[in-house]
Image (cartoon, coloured by chain):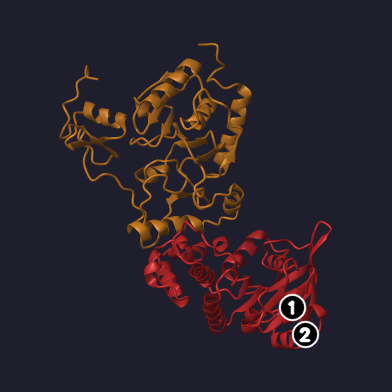
Amino acid sequence: MTPLLQVENIAKFYGARIGCTDVSFDLYPGEVMGIVGESGSGKSTLLNCLAGHLTPDDGSVQFDTRAEGLRDTITMSEPERRMLSRTDWAFVHQHARDGLRMNVSAGGNVGERLMAINARHYGDIRGSAIDWLGRVEISEDRIDDRPTAFSGGMQQRLQIARNLVTGPRLVFMDEPTGGLDVSVQARLLDLLRGLVREMNLSAIIVTHDLAVVRLLADRLMVMKDGHVIETGLTDQVLDDPQHAYTQLLVSSVLQV
Amino acid sequence: MSDYNFAYLDEQTKRMIRRAILKGLAIPGYQVPFASREMPMPYGWGTGGVQVSAAVLTPDDTFKVIDQGADDTTNAVSIRRFFQKTAGIAVTEATADASVIQTRHRIPEQVLRSDQIIVYQVPIPEPLRFLEPSEVETRKMHSLEEYGLMHVKLYEDISQHGDIATAYAYPVKVEGRYVMDPSPIPKFDNPKLEMAGIQLFGAGREQRIYAIPPYTKVVSLDFEDYPFQPTKADHACDLCAATDSYLDELIVDDEGSRMFMCSDTDYCSTRRKQGHNGAQGVPYAEDAA
């Protein structure tokens, strides 16, 4: 089986400071990988390098494109990369307002990616928008409301619908549950888990919330100071942490 | 003649503007940046159009200025006088007699010929501006031909109003490549953008020039199930009885009486001279007006 994403020796420096370095892994279709670590450990830098928002200083990111098989997304041309990010990739931001157009209705937000790949039939676009709002549990009569009128959890679900409408194969998520209260988090996680299984999505989830990766991720990567210090199956890493920092991380979770 | 250089601008500036115009004509619909000069008029009054006109005018030209279709409003009269004074050229109100026409918000009803140039005054040249505030991003979207966002605006129109409610500055795609703002002309005028004359667009404050060469394909954006429709008031002109021209609606007293009349004053008066008479019009007399 060919991996969907092959990451080799990614490094990104901010001047003399390390963003992240020596990161390598393979991600297979249908697999969900979690990246955990404290603030400033390089999680988001890594995710942005993988998603093409930042250009890494070293290494390669091979993505299994539909047409041509494995291609290095760092050296491919910008139009190709932007095409990928509209079709096969999705990026869920921590703050929904970074990923949504706040002055455009919910339907327009979901339809934008379709229109970006040349959907030109209003009825069809609206049909897909209604379908996707339903799948993320937003009722149909909110389709013409702007995201500003939505609660935080609804905005986040709308962002997910907007990203998944073109049927991507790889989803990047940056703290998708950050800033939501726990009951809303639980529903969102439930929804995400369902969608990931149903659409056979591969996903890379960056978070500092160990409960999120416990629920969603098959595999886990622990980062500290820009380095990967431990990898393994999620349950294995969380139940039997080897590295001192991972042990600290796991033991720091508050018990209710 | 006066103490001004011909057509106000110095020759180096005109060369610079002509270069931008030529580049614009070579890449239809592409916004060419140019070093816009201070003109003796406020921004928003047609500084871009005036600079383009100054760069294309020759001493033999006949100049016409249109403001919202009319030849006799403040803006039109002052720009016409400006070039009379600084270039000493002939001016006219008749579309057919003009070789260079500067316009704001309208395309003349009369079909333009291949020996005519029409210059548009443009307030905001970037069609994506109100959707994407970043200039860096919009330029990237133009260069990569990412125009999905333009349809988001039309989608929003339909979802809110049941129809594409954009009535002016209706976005067009030029020669299958660049999406362009045709300046705030009514969408009724959009089909006329495919014409024999040269079309130049000047935005002074935004420092952009763009152009449509003669006989270039210009398509108004739309959806398959909501096709583009040029609209006008469903009425005939009350002065000249024309049914095919774009109409202005006028409230004529404080009891709600109204009349419709051609926005193109030259078109209307030409028709009245030919003997057409509308519902509220009086027969045209040479000594009237």
Of helix, strand and loop, which one carries label 1?
Answer: helix
Of helix, strand and loop, which one carries label 2?
Answer: loop
Q: Nearer the viewer, residue A194 or A60?
A: A194
Looking at the image, which residue is at 19% across and 21% down? B285
Residue B212 pos. (x, y %): 49, 41
Write down which chain is painted orange. B
Residue A72 pos. (x, y %): 72, 69
Q: Quadrant of the C terminus of chain A?
A: bottom right
- Asked if B56 appears above or below B150 in the picture, the reply is above
The answer to whether residue B269 is left or right of residue A55 is left
Residue furthest to the front in view is A256
| Residue type at the position of mark 1 | Leu
Q: The disc numbered 2 marks a residue on which chain? A: A
User: Dot 2: few (<14), some (14–19), or many (≥20) neighbours within 10 Å?
Assistant: some
Q: Quadrant of the N terminus of chain A?
A: bottom right
Residue A57 pos. (x, y %): 79, 62
- Asked if B195 appears above or below B102 in the picture, the reply is below
Dot 1 or dot 2: first in sequence order is 2
Q: In the rendered image, which quarter is residue A222 located in?
A: bottom right
| Residue type at the position of mark 2 | Pro
Mark 1–mark 2 CB contact (< 8 Å): yes
Write down which chain is painted red. A
Q: Which residue is mark 2?
A: A241
- Mark drawn on residue A249: 1
**Residue A8 at least partly seen:** no
User: Dot 1: few (<14), some (14–19), or many (≥20) neighbours within 10 Å?
Assistant: some
- Asked if A181 appears above or below A98 in the picture, the reply is below
Q: The disc numbered 1 marks a residue on which chain? A: A
Looking at the image, which residue is at 31% across and 29% down? B266
Q: Which numbered disc, 1 or 2, marks the residue closer to the eye?
A: 1
Residue furthest to the top in view is B2
